Amino acid sequence: MSVETRVDRIFRPRRGPTFVAIIFLALAWFANEVALAWAHDRIPRGDVSPLPDLWFSLFPEVPVPSKKTYCAPKSNGNLNIIISRILRTFWSAGIEQLRPRELCGDLIISGHTISLFMAALVLKQYCPKKFYYVAELSYRATFIAIPCILLARKHYTIDVVLAYCLTTRIFWTYHSLSYSYHQGNFDQIPLKQSIWASMVPYLEADAPPPQHFENLWKWPSNCLRNFRKRMP
């Protein structure tokens, strides 16, 4: 019996963990939007110069961008205003082209850096072995993109560093806990003391062990069958 067949037979997928993961994603999105809406009324405006930054000092000839960017007037920041800002962002799916730009002061952590490193880590972890070059290409593209983000001067260096540390530590911590759970020594590792470690057994209960996991590239069977029927 092949590994794939054995894994599919033993580890039946459950909808519960997927639903819990979606809930966590929604809560993270909501917390991010609340932070943006709240910080908008609490940042300096006008002719305030950027803070001293190591990267900026290395490239002083690069101008500060977005000096003419529109920011909505400050308000008293009450609950109704914050909720209205969150709803406008929600209905536009976060796409600025679908709504007027109004929130300023979201340079707390680099979301672009988080997306880049998360994509690279996922490809490195789950990409089929025969497509290893895709993961390597993603890593190289990520390390090229990071200096470009800093050169654009839309983020401070600390924003990018924090984004890298946050993304890699969460990803590596979860997968270390997952591997330990499947190896049977979950209760013996120090990472077990983390707050969200108790969720790992629930989320990983229906997952195959890492040594049995194979991410195979498959064409949809129906599409391939229909294509063959049309062939002369």
Image: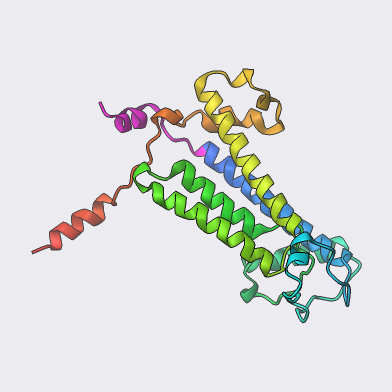
Furthest residue in direction left, as rendered:
232
Residue 7 inside the magenta-drawn segment: yes
Dominant SS of magenta comes to: helix
Q: Could you tell me which residue is drawn at 25 percent across and 56 percent down?
A: 223
Furthest residue in direction bottom, as rendered:
68
Can I make out residue 190 in this image? yes
Q: Nearer the viewer, residue 82 or 66?
A: 66
Furthest residue in direction right, as rendered:
76
Task: Please provide percent x and percent y for residue 8.
Answer: 35, 32
Q: Nearer the viewer, residue 195 or 57?
A: 57
Horizontal side, residue 99 vs residue 204: left or right = right
Task: Please provide percent x and percent y for residue 41.
Answer: 87, 66
Horizontal side, residue 153 vs residue 42: left or right = left
**Number of marks present in the image shown:** 0
The N terminus sits in image quarter: top left
The C terminus sits in image quarter: bottom left
Considering only vertical position in the picture, is 81 above or below 168? below
Considering only vertical position in the picture, is 72 above or below 224? below
Can I make out residue 84 in this image? no
Residue 50 occupies quadrant = bottom right
Q: Could you tell me which residue is drawn at 70 percent across and 30 percent down?
A: 194
Horizontal side, residue 72 vs residue 8: left or right = right
Q: Nearer the viewer, residue 118 or 201?
A: 118
Q: Could you tell me which residue is drawn at 67 percent across and 33 percent down?
A: 196
**Span colored in magenta:** 1-15
Task: Please provide percent x and percent y for residue 17.
Answer: 54, 37
